[in-house]
Amino acid sequence: MTHIQTDPVQQNRVPEVTVEFWLIKLMAVTMGETAADYLAVNLGLGLTATSLLMTAVLIVALMFQFAQRRYVPPYYWAAVVLISIVGTLVTDNLVDNLGVALQTTAIGFTIALAVTFAVWYAAEKTLSIHSIFTTRREAFYWLAILFTFALGTAVGDLVAEVFALGYLTTGLLFGGIIAVIAIAYYVFRLNAILAFWLAYILTRPLGASFGDLLSQPLEYGGLGFGTIITSMLFLSAIISLVIYMTAAQKPEEEEEEFDAPGEI
């Protein structure tokens, strides 16, 4: 008997875009902002040490993620949370340690993201997240994710701090822009891939603004909950959602067996 099996490599390695996807992504970026501040400031590790530590942890997490041949919620979302933290730290290092202006940082990451998409499309002829089933496509995917977080951090800080709109106004602004993108997609048939990546980029400053609003002291325009409480609150919510998504995930379909003609 000859067994013809489905190729596990062809299974998508990233999740479908659902309400749960956007909820956990928004909480991940919020936690990325507050956790980076907690490690660097509250724990006193400093920006450089925190960056090196979290980059090392992210590399380990991505090694586990790349080892999977399908979407596994704990591995995937651990990588998202960590890359959110590292993306924040990349921008913070450029601005605080190297003195690069937020405007320059935002432009630089916009160019880097555009180049990533251009090379990705040239190599794969698609930017769809529904067909991330090869190592090369997944590498492009995570590189783009890193740049979206770094860019979102720069844009959010630029609007909230340099333009002095404050955390709440900045969050509402980006929330409104995302709503416009959603309307453009559902009503006016905006290209699905373009709509997804625009929303993905903008959820970073949206989440970061509300993270800062919750964690920053009252004198700096926040609500004063602190980075520890805010980070633990969102981490608990993320873990709960990941547990739910793992339990709700459909089991792998049993491999089908077929008898080859003329064989027993």
Image (cartoon, grey):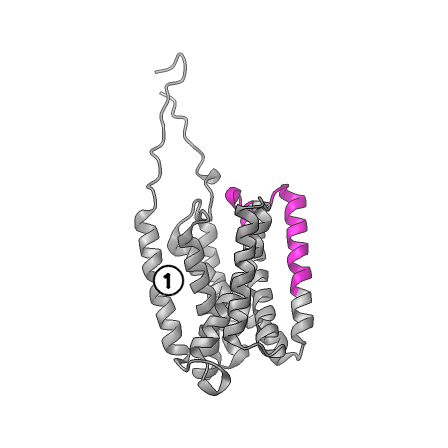
Disc 1 crowd, CA 10 A, few/some/many (<14, 14-19, 20+): many
> Dot 1: what SS?
helix
Q: Residue at x 56, y 69 (%)?
A: 153
Q: x, y (%) of residue 108?
A: 68, 66
Task: Establish if 103 lies above or below 255.
Answer: below
Q: Nearer the viewer, residue 261 or 249?
A: 249
Q: Nearer the viewer, residue 18 or 14?
A: 18
Q: x, y (%) of residue 151?
A: 60, 65
**Which residue, as the protein is rendered here, is positioned at the far front?**
187
Task: Establish if 66 lies above or below 29.
Answer: above
Query: Residue 39 falls in which quadrant of the image?
Result: bottom left
Q: x, y (%) of residue 45?
A: 47, 81
Horizontal side of 23 relative to 97 (left or right) equals left
Q: Is residue 125 magenta?
A: yes
Q: Residue at x 54, y 71 (%)?
A: 170
Q: Nearer the viewer, residue 211 or 110?
A: 211
Q: Magenta segment range? A: 109-138
Q: Which residue is mark 1?
A: 238
Task: Establish if 149 lies above or below 75.
Answer: below
Horizontal side of 252 relative to 155 (left or right) equals left
